[in-house]
Amino acid sequence: MASLAAILGSGSMTNSIPEIEGMEVIFIIGSNTKESHPVIANRMIKAYRNGARIILADPRGIPMARFAEVHLQLRPGTDLALLNGIARVIVKEGLKNTEFIRDNTQKFEEWEKSLEPFTPEYVESVTGVPAGLIVKAARLYGGSRKAGLFYTMGITQHTHGTDNVSAVANLALVTGNIGRESTGINPLRGQNNVQGACDSGALPNVYPGYQKVNAPENREKFEKAWGPALPDKPGLTATEMFNGSIKALYIMGENPVLTDANQGHVVHALEGMEFIVVQDIFMTETAKLADVVLPAACFAEKEGTFTNTERRVQLVRKAVNPPGEAREDLSILMGIAGRIGLPASYCGAEDVFAEMGSLWQGVQGITYGRLRRGGIQWPCPSKDHPGTRYLYKTGFPVGRPPFTVVPFTPPAELPDAQYPYLLTTGRNLFQYHSGSMTRRVRQIEEHAGRAYAEISPADAAALGVKEGDVISITSRRGTIDISARVTGGIRKGIVFIPMHYAEAAANVITNNALDPVAKIPEFKACAARIEKKTA
Amino acid sequence: MITLTIDGKKTQVVGGATVLEAARKLGVYIPTLCQHPKLTPFGGCRLCIVEVKGVPRPLASCTTPAAEGMEVTTSTPQLEGLRKTVLELILSDHPDDCMTCEKAGNCTLQELAYSYGMRENRFRGERRTYAKRDANPFIERDLEKCILCGRCVKVCKEVQGVSAIDFAYRGFQAKISTPFEHDLNCEFCGQCVSVCPTGALTGKGWAKKGRQVEVNEVDTVCGYCGVGCNLTLNVKGNEIARVTSREDTWNEGWLCVKGRFGYKFVNSPDRLTTPLIKKDGKFVEAGWDEALQYATDRLMEIKGKYGPDAIGGLSSARCTNEENYLFQKIIRAGFGTNNVDHCARL
Amino acid sequence: MMAMNLEIKVCMGTGGMAAGGEGVLKAFEAELKHNGLEAGFGKCSSGKVGCRGFCARDVLVDVIVDGQKTTYQYIKPEMVSRIVKEHIMEGRPVAEWEVKEDYHIFHDKQIKVVLHDCGEIDPEDIGAYIERGGYEAAKKVLSELGPADVIELVKKSGLRGRGGAGFPTGVKWEAARKSPGDVKYIICNADEGDPGAFMDRSVIEGNPHSVIEGMIIAAYSVGASNGYVYIRAEYPLAVERLRIALDAARQKNLLGKNILGSGLDFDIKVKLGAGAFVCGEETALIASIEGERGMPRAKPPFPVASGLWGKPTVINNVETLANIPCIIRKGAEWFASLGTEKSRGTKVFALTGKVKNTGLIEIPMGIPLRDIVFEIGGGIENGKKYKAVQTGGPSGGCIPEDCLDVKIDYESLMQLGAIVGSGGMIVLDEDDCMVNVARYFLNFTQSESCGKCVPCRVGTKRLLEILDRITKGEGREGDIELLEKLSQDIKLTSLCGLGQTAPNPVLSTLKYFRHEYEAHIRDRKCPAKACRALITFSISEALCKGCGACMRACPAGAITGEKKQPHKLNQALCIKCGSCFDVCKFKAVVKE
């Protein structure tokens, strides 16, 4: 989300979910919305029934394709070329929003020039999407002034993920499709409180509310509030923490062994550490490597707030008691804080939230009293502020957002003679993330408990593989055995694996090459080899 | 705006509103079964019939658009008689097993039967019987209790965009069916379960976990994806009996399979229940004091040995804002490093 | 000296084909060729024509020599050579095979407007239709009249919808014309579903172009560019002829872009229905075309405002549309001069049941029912006594003897509790049990209910159950009142026309034949001796000759007896099949 924040001032959804039903055009790229964000998909379907037209860019025939007027089935990792190609058509056909560009943006001319090579024909040759469809998509999106863009990890989990996001932002800027109701850019967050974790400062470079740690005035403010002196240089990102310099790791509610790219690398790094504390609700693959395991409470067992993907802060209420000796994370954290001499005696979650509000204006106006009546979308700077449904109504905090020149770079690893398939990963509807929750729900396991890899009928035929056969998939980093699912929804030469299954973990083979800015690994494209396993 | 009169009271509604919506706006009660405010009108149950001046026959208020100057009467002896006939017809093809039905106490049909005092039935006759044979682990379909209100069909099509079910067969044998009577195979969002006005659709895991009067309803937020749907945990004792969602929240009561049916991990026997310390490669149960003291001692020791930047903290996108806030505060202010992150990128 | 012109027309509607029309036509062609006759005539043609109505006499053949028409009935291929030899070659028509007086009576009372060309022209030859003035109306409309003029003309003609409801066609067109929208549709409803009805089928089989022409005119008037014919898949011949006709019309630019240079773009698609009765209901029909299950929607909005895919849509029945070209050609005044003040023009009926002459008839509105039954129909078969006419199919009602002089028009029939409907007309005699008639129709509507609304789905089932038990002799005191109450409630609460009219057969038979119901319930007797559970068979000792025919016919072994001695029937074994009654030549088997 770093790129979007850099360009516009914030990295979150600019619209709220209910606004989706008012959109004229919905452009979804790199998001399997119906499976990963099903209830947002419900809104899109509502919009569709109201007459909204949907453009979908995804390599696979995902469920949302049924509602798409244009489905751009691009090769994984070629999003940049596609986005630039669409932008070029918009500019060439006079669909650009001249006034908006003049009044609100900068660096248009330079960017416009950079689009020159991205003719529909060239883009077709790179992406595999027919030129006519590229033009059609451009006319649809560029022809509307009430259009919404949606993306998720399909865009960001690449070595050039930051560039991808910039290219998405360029489309919104060139058409002026931002800053109005039902009009904007919407990255959909994958986990229940990713937005909130970022907001609350669980990032190496910023304090709560995205206040940079290397800005002295911010440091002073937080030192004053918290007491001790604070370090001035940004810390390591999660992925960088597995590069050897960390000797002790405190992990709260994460399972990097399963969720990070290149599992072998992560396990090796953890094994090399001197001390690991894991605080979780299950004995995860990561917890098994820990020195101390602290039993925590799940969402149904505690008080607090989650902030969803549209910046809506909502109250989490306790419904049942944690099992056995398990405790709420907050109380565990207070126990640690007290033992290291950090004053942290809060009466409860409400108290903590109030402290955060005093240090970040964005949520200053939000109180538990208000939240009991319903969620509030930040920014909400004062007690009488209703919250903010969509961002940038009155301009951009960064001033004039720039167009970003984004040259096309292919994925870090491309298919070759040795590894002829392009592997991509994602979620399915039934399982969730590393599966630590859903895989312990008997019903879900009964229905969707088996790992699988999707391959095209043509590849299946070439490999002599039938539905349900076991295949082994190998990359430069590892091998997994997995059952084959043959589907017409995927293109020849591409293989898809859902990330949820530890027994055939996709991330044994994915590439941990990082995006240079956002430090996100390239989960979405790597080269692989497939062999049929003889029974 | 359109002005019309309902039971002598004048009201104004926007063009396109139905007579039923106008009546609800006035607070006038009209019984309904098939109508659902989030779905397009169906007009099948015929309970919401009203009299409109100048129209010779009663009209279904759920499908009749309000018109300027319309004069509507919602309750007359004739209308109530007709409603009673319709209700009696529905009940003549419905099992009398409220005493064991999952839905009892939370069933629109039961409430209507009660308020209309249905004891005798003039129309007793054949009842449809079906074998329950769905293999899916989420949704229980008891078609004998189905009144063919069509809400499930509509929600599946209009809200979920799936159309996994539809009407099939004709006449008295008409029923809601999957294509070619296959087992239900869909996204299992359970939207259909949430809108079913009878016990025809329930959750498979709900059986005997508690009737609605016994459960404590706790409103909270879903713990799965970033959409953050409103959930209501229906709790009996220390166990979640089922999950529902309120219609008046931003997600309109809609959920996905994980949110609605993926709650059983909470009571999973695999849950960690006591702090553990690894000794000689094996986890040994420990008390909280011991575990916390040991953990902080070790962390401080390593900090002392290598400096604060040898410490790292991985926070969680699964934890609350307050927990994340406190965690990063501990890493920054307590251990003196900015090495704090979470899996936003994954 | 041989004649100059020869024309042979073989009836080849579905009825004619079933009777062997194809073989007859082939035989004629072969005979003419064999005898070298084709060259001998100035003009010689032999061909198929559509139904001319009197299907009971098929295969009907017209042999027209120099304009002199002779009609033969019950023709089989082996009879052809004699006709060719004696009639055509020797000039002596085969009198014994010619139609008789009753054939002419059957036709004399009819006035054929819609059926004018049916049975006269080859339905697969657009040229034959054009030769008789076909498409002149469309040309006239497209070149001379404005859409509003056409609508005015149709309104003036007084034409009302022939599908059953009788809504004024011109008013419907006008409403659709005035509905805002750039896309509009014309749908021809050819989903004829009433049991025993074959009016629309015969029109399409006999003269499909008349319907197409009507649709073109409707499209022009309403401003539609797309048309559909929704026709049952069970009508394969009609579908085939319709498709041939559509292709021919497209080739002549009577359909397609810029029709005849008028600027009108209009084309017609054929949509096959899957045989659901309810799809004749216009909103269900629309749902079916849209690919949904055929279930009715609430009205309003009416299709003229929001129909197919939410666009303004006119749905007209086949017969309604087939009337349009005649109205344009001959004028509104001419059309209005036929029929009665409120019911103008003619109506096609499918006359079936216990009359001597069954078939397709077209009569001017307003003639008495008695004329249809006793003149056109030739009276009741086998000298039995008239009991009732059932009109309007499952939505209709019965007309008893007292009301035989009722004029056939929309309002008069409605007053009696019957309806004109789409044109089904079933004649019942003394052997028909009226409770059973009601049960028959309820069984039909119940099994054809779409299941959407409660009163229709469950209510008709309960009506049927009550009727069922009455005919089985298990009727209860209070059942009649319950039938009446439930019928009224179903009528008032059902969503669509199917449910709203489904109780009509019950109410109508209760109105005129209540005593039959009472006899079933109170006396456990079926006055018509039709309900098996309520009759007993016995053998009259006095009349039985001991021939043994009944004993041989009995499938249950219930009859015993010595030769030439009176036989005995064991009631315990009797299954009341009536076989003994039917075979006894001496009327010794008594049915009570």
Image (cartoon, helix red, strand yellow):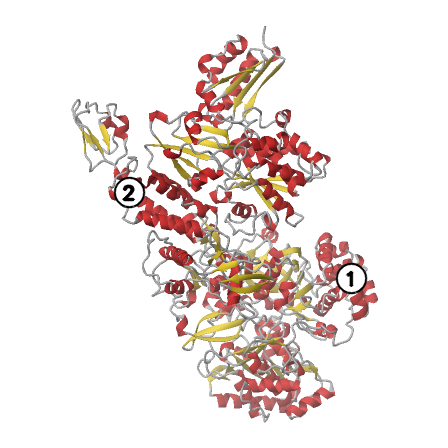
**Disc 2 marks which residue?**
C518
User: Could you say where residue C409 lies in the image, as x and y percent from the top left?
Assistant: 48, 36
Crowd tier of the residue under label 1, counting other residues whose Cα lies within 10 Å: few below 14, some 14–19, many 20 or above? many
Tell me where residue C116 sits by quadrant. Answer: top right
Tell me where residue A253 sits by quadrant. Answer: bottom right
Amino acid residing under circle 2: Glu
Closest to the observer, B286 or B1: B1
Quadrant assignment for the C terminus of chain B = bottom right
User: Could you say where residue C463 lies in the image, as x and y percent from the top left?
Assistant: 36, 47
Amino acid residing under circle 1: Lys
Chain under callout 2: C
Assign a secondary structure to mark 1.
Answer: loop
Chain under callout 1: A
Furthest residue to the front?
C341
Q: Which disc number belongs to residue A96? A: 1
- Whether discs 2 and 1 lie on one chain: the answer is no
C62 shown above or below A337 = above
Q: Which disc number belongs to residue A362? A: none
Q: Nearer the viewer, mark 2 or mark 1?
A: 2
Quadrant assignment for the N terminus of chain B = bottom right
User: Could you say where residue A53 lies in the image, as x and y percent from the top left?
Assistant: 66, 57
For the point 54% across and 86% down, the residue is A348
What whole-number distance in Å separates the C-alpha atoms at marks 2 and 1?
Answer: 83 Å
Furthest residue to the top?
C1
Crowd tier of the residue under label 2, counting other residues whose Cα lies within 10 Å: few below 14, some 14–19, many 20 or above? many
Q: How many numbered markers are drawn?
A: 2
B346 shown above or below C65 = below
Closest to the observer, C340 or C277: C340
